[in-house]
Image: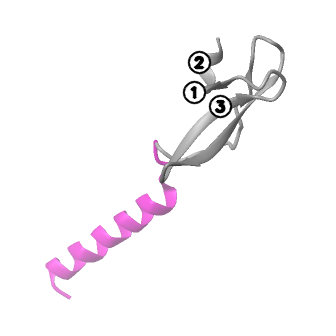
Amino acid sequence: MTSDEGFYIVLSDTILQETIMGGASKNSRTAVTTHKFACPCGGEVIMKTLFESGKLKNVAECTQCKRVERRPKDFK
């Protein structure tokens, strides 16, 4: 075994140890939670996907007053 082979073995053990012992990445979801949005009328805001004129369109709709907005935070 030459010193170069030993270097690669140590390097591979280090990489293996980092992947096993490493924490969650910054973009991973560690807790699955759903954010609930509320309309000023008191209803719950749900997201819907509509297919209009050949395109998918995401809209937010209040279940109580049927108000439709582009984003849930537009209900404020």
Residue type at mark 2?
Answer: Asp
The residue lying toward the viewer, choosing from 34 and 23, is 34
Give the numbered dot on residue 74: 2
Furthest residue toward front: 53
Residue type at mark 1?
Answer: Arg
In the picture, measured across the screen, residue 47 lies left or right of residue 5, that is right
Give yes or no for contact between labels 3 and 1 (Cβ–Cβ under 8 Å): yes
Give the numbered dot on residue 71: 1
Residue denoted by label 3? 60
Image point 69% across, 44% down: which residue? 32
Q: Residue 66, position in %: x, y?
A: 77, 26
For label 2, the SS is helix
Q: Quick one: quadrant of the C terminus?
A: top right
Q: Is residue 5 above or below residue 44?
A: below
Which numbered disc, 3 or 1, marks the residue that appears first in the sequence? 3
Magenta segment includes 37 = no
Q: Residue 1, position in %: x, y?
A: 20, 88
Asked whether the viewer can see residue 32, the reply is yes
